[in-house]
Amino acid sequence: MSAQTPIERVQLLAMDIETTGLDPQAHSIVSIGLMPLTLERIHCNHSLYWVLKPTSELNDKSVTFHHITHAEISNAPTFSQISEQLLAAMAGKVMVVHYRNIERGFLDQALRKSLGEGIEFPVIDTMQLEARVYRKKLSWFARIMGRKPESIRLSDSRERLNLPAYQAHHALTDALGTAELLQAQIANRYSRTTPVGELWD
């Protein structure tokens, strides 16, 4: 796909991954949510969601975040068992995530362990799109006055664009939230004919 392709003609797939921690080298994936979308529609009936048996231990902190317990993962598939279906779903799509370091880093590491090679894929990061607007360098005067930069977390970004609040840290719900956020960002700040290369990383 050319970077000049208008975003309205791009097949998109929102993804969220929940993990046992933040380091792809030491922690692992515990759930994955996928939500196909276009600028007009989110295809919930084609969504995919997996709870996975992680290769690293669940800990109290991660369970508090994503609420996936030891009982839920006891009979869950491993990443290797769902990797073929996952890659088939991703094929030909531009991925949409909120904070690309998690999805890219953990998927790459999981595939290296599972298949012996990593993955690179085009991704539109809705957090980065928010950062373009709200994380510009604060002036020295604003810093002296104690002004803090706007939050670019998923829930805060959605609230600014008048999107409904969802429970955070469920992979499928967060994938839906990310899909809706991208639609709102394009509608409010870009154009349907914006080249995808201006949005992806």
Image: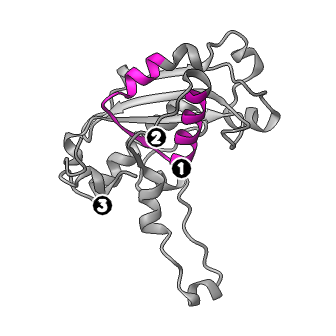
The CA span between labels 1 and 2 is 8 Å
Q: How many marks?
A: 3
Q: Which residues are magenta?
A: 84-112
Which amino acid type corresponds to the residue marked 3 in the rendered image? Arg
143 with respect to 184 (left or right): right
The quadrant of the rendering that contains the N terminus is: top left
The residue at which mark 1 appears reads as: 155
* Residue position for label 2: 177
Res 115 quadrant in image: top right
Query: Magenta includes 87?
Result: yes
Residue 86: x and y, percent? 46, 22
Residue closest to the eye, 117 or 7: 117
Q: Is residue 100 left or right of residue 121?
A: right
Q: What numbered label is drawn on residue 189?
A: 3
Work out how far the residue at label 1 is from the one at label 3, CA to CA, in angstroms.
Answer: 18 Å
Residue 78 location (% of width, % of height): 63, 16
Q: Is residue 92 magenta?
A: yes
If you read the primary sequence from the N terminus, does the residue marked by circle 1 or circle 2 appear first?
1
| Picture coordinates of residue 165, whole percent (x, y) | 51, 44
Side of 162 where 187 appears, left or right: left
Query: Mark 1: which amino acid?
Result: Ser
Residue 90 image position (x, y, % from top left):
39, 28
Left or right of residue 109, residue 180 in this image? left
Above or below residue 3? Residue 169 is above
Mark 1 or mark 3, earlier in chain = 1
